[in-house]
Amino acid sequence: MMTTDKKNPKETPEQAAPEQDPKEAKINDLTQTLQRLQADFENYRKRVERDQQLQKQQSKKDIILKMISVLDNFELALKSAPKDTFAQGIEMIFAQLMDTLEQEGLRIMHVETFDPHYHEALLSETSDKEAGTILEVLQKGYLLGETVIRHAKVKIAK
């Protein structure tokens, strides 16, 4: 049997405790092992769920990025098409596509002054407006949730 001695600071409380019944020690050891395994499994489950959510968001982002070029082409078609029933059909399809993408979290950027986090200045022009004011949006910018997925390309005032 061990005695606790103040001269031996490396001795742990388990060593200082009286000897346990081997069955009790085994039960305690197995209980601790089970608790660790349960905690490890819970952490694993949470990590897998988080990874799946990130994968899902990335897939959504990739698909929406591809759809943005379709939106651009729709807008070009609407600008150049004569105002007849065919153009009205294109407008309806475009509106439906935009509604669907907005339901998935896509938003068009609407900002009056230049912000490098949201815009890419392609041109600047002398103007009577305040410097940094957006004069023209050359290509729309889009947000997915709060994340910029395409910067707006703009012309700004000097």
Image (spheres, helix red, strand yellow):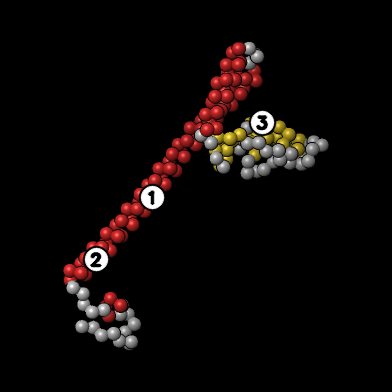
The image shows residue 27 at horizontal and vertical percentages of 21, 65
Mark 1 highlights which residue?
46
Q: In which quarter of the image is the C terminus?
A: top right
Q: Which badge, 2 or 1, comes first in the chain's sequence?
A: 2
Disc 3 to disc 1, C-alpha distance:
43 Å
The image shows residue 100 at horizontal and vertical percentages of 52, 29
Q: Name the residue furthest right.
A: 128
Disc 3 to disc 2, C-alpha distance:
68 Å
Residue depicted at x 52% and y 33%: 103
Which image quadrant for residue 91? top right
Residue depicted at x 21% and y 74%: 20
Contact check, label 3 and label 2, Cβ < 8 Å: no
Contact check, label 2 and label 1, Cβ < 8 Å: no
Q: In which quarter of the image is the N terminus?
A: bottom left
Mark 2 highlights which residue?
29
Residue type pointed to by label 2: Asp
* Label 2: how many Cα within 10 Å (few below 14, some 14–19, many 20+): few
Image: 120 above or below 2: above
Q: Can residue 128 be seen in this view?
A: yes
In the visual, does 147 lie left or right of 12?
A: right
Select label 3 or label 2 by which is in front.
2
Viewer-side residue, 12 vs 79 = 12
In the visual, does 150 lie left or right of 36?
A: right
Contact check, label 3 and label 1, Cβ < 8 Å: no
Residue depicted at x 57% and y 24%: 95
Q: Which badge, 3 or 1, comes first in the chain's sequence?
A: 1
Mark 3 highlights which residue?
138
Residue type pointed to by label 3: Leu
The image shows residue 23 at horizontal and vertical percentages of 17, 69
* Label 3: how many Cα within 10 Å (few below 14, some 14–19, many 20+): some
Viewer-side residue, 36 vs 136 = 36
